[in-house]
Amino acid sequence: MSQFDTTAPFYAAYRPGIPEEAVELLARRVVGKRQRALLDLGSGTGQVPLALAGEVTEIDVVEQDAGMLAEADKALAALPVIARMHNSSAEEFAPPASYRADLVTICRAFHWMAQGEVLSRLEGMTAPDATVAVMGDGSLWTARTAWTDALRALIQEYLGEERRAGVGKKYATHNRPYLDILAESAFGQVEEHTIAVEREWTTDMVIGYLYSTSFAARPLFGEQVDGFERRARALLDEHTAAGGLTEHASFQVLLGRRG
């Protein structure tokens, strides 16, 4: 069982997309090229390829969760761009020997990967001037507002103090900045961009989002899931009435190239 079993439909419907400013940063890295091949690792339901479909000529989507990959396939099927689906981890993805990506994206997924191994493997499957983009913005677990603090405390009441990472698993934090990890790789010429994001949530959106995560997916609660949801909805409705469910996030984009 993966950490995202049962979550794919919720992920497709309720996960926030990537900011338009991030899309523009990525698009500039391939502008003017005749061939613009995008490789998206740990793709989830294909949010990044969907946002960049108009900027590239071909897309390879790599996702080890079959349910997530099926959602990505549905999202990309109608687009006028070649899109290939690969049910594989980033560590095991093995394209044809001649394959070369012009842009590699890893969004909200780098923490699940053997980071050094993945970056090393990318050396042999990227164009000389390719960009590797590592992106992310935390989660409602890490957000610090009155309503997210109260929501996290409720989750912990049911599941324990430690953050979960799927059924029977605990979340392993990574203490090294991604900037340092990328800088030590072959793609060590790194630019860092931080994009301020403000999101307004509704109770339904937050509940759907929680069920898309590895830390609050429905199976984690077992027979208590309906009770948890009732209490979470009441908590969120109360905070909505008191001023709304606003999240202030920072979306980080690291762009690495060969020196």
Image (cartoon, rainbow, N blue to C red):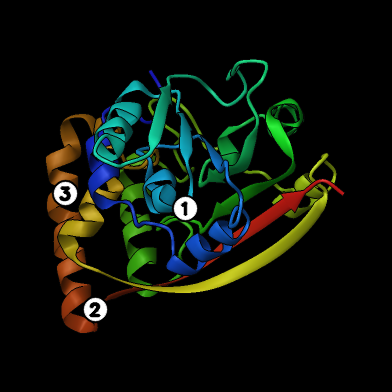
Element type where label 3 sits in the image: helix
Say whether marks 2 and 1 touch (CB < 8 Å).
no
Foreground residue among 79 and 145? 79
Tag count in the figure? 3
Foreground residue among 190 and 199? 190
The residue lying at 63 percent from left, 41 percent from top is 102
Q: CA distance from mark 3 to mark 2?
A: 19 Å
From what the image shows, is residue 128 above or below residue 256?
A: above
Q: Which residue is mark 2?
A: 244
Tell me if 144 is positioned left or right of 15 in this view. right
Q: Which residue is mark 3?
A: 229
Q: Quadrant of residue 243?
A: bottom left
Where's residue 226, x and y in %? 12, 41
Where's residue 213, x and y in %? 36, 42
Label 1 sits on what residue type?
A: Glu
Answer few, some or many: residues within 10 Å of disc 2's Cα (few below 14, many 20 plus, some between 14 and 19).
Answer: some
Kindly report which numbered mark, 3 or 2, lies closer to the viewer in this rendering.
2
On-image quarter of the N terminus: top left
From what the image shows, is residue 49 above or below residue 205?
A: above
Upstream in the sequence, badge 2 or badge 1? 1
Upstream in the sequence, badge 1 or badge 3? 1
Answer few, some or many: residues within 10 Å of disc 3's Cα (few below 14, many 20 plus, some between 14 and 19).
Answer: some
Q: Which residue is mark 1?
A: 55
Label 2 sits on what residue type?
A: Gly
Upstream in the sequence, badge 3 or badge 2? 3
Determine the residue located farthest toward the bottom in the rendered image. Answer: 243
Q: Quadrant of residue 215?
A: top left
